Image: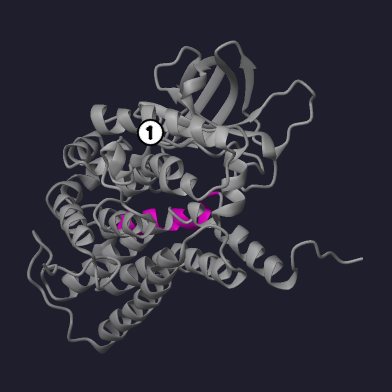
Amino acid sequence: MPLDFVPAVGEADFTDDQVRLLTLANRLGRERFAPRAAQWDREASFPFANYDDLREAGLLALCVPKAFGGEGADFATYCMIGAEIGRFCGATALTYNMHICSTMWTGMLADGIAMTDAQRAEHAARRELHFARVVKDGAVYAQPFSEGSAAAAGKAPFGTTARKVDGGWLLNGRKIFASLSGAADYYGILCTEDRGDHHPDMRDTLYIAVPGKAEGLTVTGDWDPMGMRGTVSRTLLLKDVFVPDDEQLMPRGVYYKAAQTWPAMFFTLSPTYLGVAQAAYDFTVQYLRGEVPGQPPVKRRMYPTKQIAVAQMRIQLESMRSLFWRVIHEARPNPTKDQRMRLYAAHYAVMEGANDIARLAIRTCGGQSMLKDLPLERLYRDSRCGALMLPWTAELILDRMGRETLYEPGERDE
C-alpha cells in the first residue's frame, strides 16, 4: 500500500513494514506531537504525553527483536522513523533516539560484534530482561554520555567508574547533558571499570543500566537552554550507586569493540535533524502559499526572491536526503574506509544543513517567523544544537575526516 504523504526521508521503495511504521509515526506527529511541541519548548518540560503515545503505539519496542516481542526494525528503518518524528517534535525525536539506541545497541548491533561463547550467553540472558521491561512494562531507557571531558568524543576513558563488588557493581561519577533526566526508568551509564590500579583504560568501558530510583542517584542543576528544551538534559550524580550484575547492557569489554566495529552507532542523532530540516522547509512552503492554519491566507509566493530561496532550500534538502539514504543502508560492522568517510560526511551535512535550511526559512518568511506563535523560530533554535552534540560534533567530524583521509591506520609523521 503506497504512502499518501512524502516522508522526511523522501519517496522510496519502502517495505510493507516501513510503510506501516512511517504512517503511524506521521499520524502521531501530525495529530499529537506537533500541537504539543510549543508547550515543551516554552516550559522546557519533558514530553511525557508523547511518550504515552509512543508506548501505546508500540514504538518504544521499535528495535527490540521480534523474538522478544518487538518490531525488530533494522538500522535504516529506525532512521526513517526517527526523521519522521523529528519533523513534528525535535525534542521527542532526540530523546526517543536515546531510548532506541539502548535497545538497538543490545539487539541488532550486538549481534554483529565478535564475542566469546561465554559473553554471548551472558548477553543473551541479560538482554532478555531489558527487552521485557520495554515490551511488557513500557519502560523508557536513557543514555547519558557526556561528562565534560574527552571521553564522550572517544578520546579518553569515562570518568564515571564502576567497581566490582559482591553481586554487582558500585558506580560513582557524573553525567552532564543527560537527556530524559528525571523521566527515564533506566539510565544506560557508560563508565570505566575501576580495577584499583589507577590506570583507567577505554577498553574497560562498561555499559550498565541504573534504575531511575536507585539509591545514590541524583538529578541536579537547572535546564534553560537555547534549543531542544524538551529533552530536559540535566546533570546526573552517582554516589555509591549499587546495581546488580544483571543490569549490564553489554558484557565487559564489548562496548569498546562496538565503538570500533560499528561507527554508524553514533549516526543516530542525525534522523532528528533531518526531520527538523524537513519541518522548516514544510513551513516555508505553507507560509508562502498562505496555508498556515490560524494565519491570514496571504500569499507571498509570487515574489522571485521567495521562489529562489525555496529552490535553494529544496536543493540542500535533497542533497541531505540522498546522502542520508545511502549511509543508513550501508550501515554495518567494519565498514570500508570509503563508507566511513561517507558516514561522516552525511552526519555533517545533516547537522549543519538543518540549520542552513532553518536560517533560509527565517530570512524568506520574514519578521513573522520570529514570533513564538509560529514554529519556525523554535525550529531554528533546535536546528543549531545538532552540530554541538557529542560524540560527533561538526568540529570533530571535520577532524576525523581530514585525519583519516590523510593517514592510514598506524601511520605517523617523524
Helix, strand or loop status at disc 1: strand
Where in the figure is residue 289, as x and y percent of width and height? 14, 76
**Picture quarter containing residue 184?**
top left
Left or right: 15, with 98 as reference point: left
Where in the figure is residue 268, as x and y percent of width and height? 43, 53
- Image quadrant for the N terminus? bottom left
Residue 355 in view, yes or no: no
**Residue denoted by label 1:** 141
Residue 104 in view, yes or no: yes
Q: Nearest the camera: 344 or 292? A: 344
Instruction: Relative to 410, say whether 254 is above or below.
Output: above
**Picture quarter containing residue 239?**
top right
Q: Residue furthest right?
A: 414
Q: Main secondary structure of the magenta part?
A: helix
- Image quadrant for the C terminus? bottom right
Q: Is residue 107 magenta?
A: no
Tell me the residue at 17%/79% (across/down): 300
Left or right: 139, with 6 as reference point: right
Where in the figure is residue 194, as x and y percent of width and height? 69, 24
Q: Which residues are magenta?
A: 377-390
Q: Nearest the camera: 348 or 290? A: 348
Q: Is residue 388 magenta?
A: yes
User: What's under tag 1, amino acid-wise?
Assistant: Tyr
Instruction: Relative to 132, say whether 344 is above or below.
Output: below
Tell me the residue at 25%/26% (across/down): 137
Left or right: 251, with 371 as reference point: right
Tell me the residue at 36%/72% (across/down): 321
**Picture quarter containing residue 11?**
bottom left
Where in the figure is residue 161, as x and y percent of width and height? 63, 25
Q: Nearest the camera: 247 or 139? A: 247
How many residues crowd mark 1 within 10 Å: few (<14), some (14–19), many (20+)? many
The colour scheme is: one colour
